Image (tube, rainbow, N blue to C red):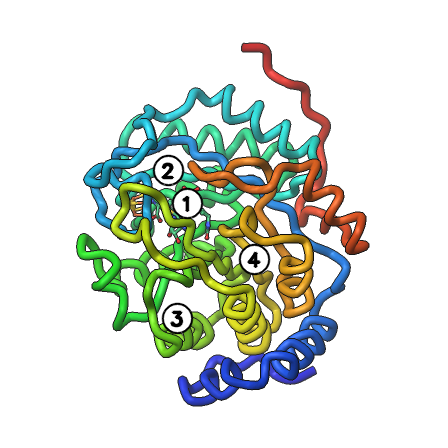
Amino acid sequence: MDAIRNDWTKEEIKAIYDKPVLELMFEAGMVHRKYHEPSEVQVCTLLSVKTGGCPEDCGYCPQAARYHTDVKVEKLLPTEVVLNKALEAKESGSTRFCMGAAWREVRDNKDFDRVLDMVKGVSSMGMEVCCTLGMLTDEQAKKLKDAGLYAYNHNIDTSEEFYEDVISTRKYDDRLETIDNVRNNEISVCSGGIIGMGESEGDRVGMLHTLATLTEHPESVPVNALVPVEGTPMEDQPRVSVWEMVRMIATARIVMPKAMVRLSAGRVRMNLEEQALCFLAGANSIFAGDTLLTTPNPGYVEDKEMFQILNLQPRASHKESVKFEKIPQ
Ligand code: SAM
Ligand code: DTB
Ligand code: SF4
C-alpha cells in the first residue's frame, strides 16, 4: 500500500483536485478499494441536544443568536430524552450517535456534567458516541474521554485565508488547538468543512491541505454542502453542483486514504444518482435520520431504499453491542 503522507503541498493537492473529473473519481475509487470495503457505509445519527442562541457569528449557521432564523432557542435536552433518541437511532441501524450543542465552547458547569452523563449512557449502548460542543480545553477533553467519548467533531470549515470572511468571533488557530486537545486525549478526530459559502477552489484545496498535513489525519472528514438558511448571511448562496462535491470527496479520499469521508449536509437536495457518484468518489459515511441539527435530511426509509438499490450495507460499530431497554418518560 502507498504510504500515508502528511507532507502534501497545496500544489500537489490542487493538481489532484483539477484532474479531469472522471479520472479523479477513478483514482479515488482505486484508493477507496485499497483501504476500505467499498460496499460498507457508516451510518451516523445527529441530535441537537442544545439548540440555538449561540454567541458566535458563523455566517452559515442558523443557530447563531444574532441572525433571525426560524430556529427556536432550547435548553439542554433531558438526559433520558437523549438516551431514548440514541436507542431509536441504534434500532434504525446507526452505529454512531453524535450530540451537537450550539455553544462557542464548553464551560465547566452543570450542563457539561449532564453531557458527560449522556456520553456515558450512549457509550454503554455499544454505539460510537461523538460530540460537537465547540471549543474544548485539554481537561474537558480528558473528562469526555473518561466518560467514554469515542469521537469529537470540530470542523475547520474552510481555508485559513477565507476563515475570517465566515467567522469573526474566533480564529482558525482556536479550532486547531481544540483538535490538538482532542487528539492528545486519544479521542478520534472528526474534522472537515463546508463548500458553497462563496469560497474559491483555492480555499477548498487550502482546507484539505490543513487536514491532510495534520500530524495524524482526522479519522473522519465530513464534507458538507452549505444548507442556505433564511436569515443567515449566506441565505442566497447558489447551490453547489454535484461535481464540486465529487471533486472534494475524491480529493479528500486520495490525500487522506484511511479517513472515513462523510457525505454530510446537503444530501436532501441530491438525488440517488448524485449520491451514488459521491460514493463512487470515495464517500463511505452519511448522516441518517430526517433532521441534521436543525435542517432536513433524507429519512431512514429513503436511505434504506438507497442502500438496497446501490447494494450498500451499514458498517458495523467499532464497539461491542449491548442490549438496552427504552427508558420510560
Ligand atoms: N457549536 C459547535 C461548533 O461550531 O463546533 C458544534 C455545532 S456546529 C452547528 C457543527 C458544524 O455544522 C459546523 O462546524 C459547520 O461545519 C456545520 N454547519 C452548520 N451550519 C451549516 C449549514 N447551514 N450548512 C452546512 N453545514 C453547516
Ligand atoms: C458536520 O460536519 N455536519 C453536521 C455535523 N458535523 C455536526 C452538522 C450539519 C448541520 C447542518 C445545518 C443544521 O442542520 O443546522
Ligand atoms: Fe455556534 Fe457552532 Fe453555529 Fe458557529 S456553527 S454559530 S459555534 S452553533
Residue 162 in the image: x percent, y percent?
Answer: 27, 68
Say which mark, if any, is on residue 262. Answer: 4
**Disc 2 CB within 8 Å of nearest ligand 1 atom:** yes
Numbered disc 2: secondary structure? strand
Dot 1 or dot 4, earlier in sequence = 1
Distance from the alpha carbon under mark 2 to that under mark 1: 6 Å
Query: Is 12 left, or right, of 157 in this rendering?
Result: right
Nearer to the camera, 145 or 247: 247
Q: In which quarter of the image is ligand 3?
A: top left
Q: Which residue is drawn at 56% across and 27% down?
A: 85
Q: Dot 4 surroundings within 10 Å: few (below 14), some, or many (20 or more)?
A: many
Dot 2 or dot 3, earlier in sequence = 2
Query: Is 41 left, or right, of 172 in this rendering?
Result: right
Numbered disc 4: secondary structure? strand
The amino acid marked with disc number 3 is: Met
Q: Dot 2 surroundings within 10 Å: few (below 14), some, or many (20 or more)?
A: many
Distance from the alpha carbon under mark 2 to that under mark 4: 20 Å
The residue beneath circle 1 is 132
**Disc 1 CB within 8 Å of nearest ligand 1 atom:** yes
Distance from the alpha carbon under mark 1 to that under mark 3: 19 Å
Residue 138 in the image: x percent, y percent?
Answer: 33, 52
Distance from the alpha carbon under mark 2 to that under mark 3: 24 Å
The residue beneath circle 3 is 207
Q: Are marks 1 and 3 in contact (CB under 8 Å)?
A: no
**Disc 4 CB within 8 Å of nearest ligand 2 atom:** yes
Residue 160 in the image: x percent, y percent?
Answer: 28, 70
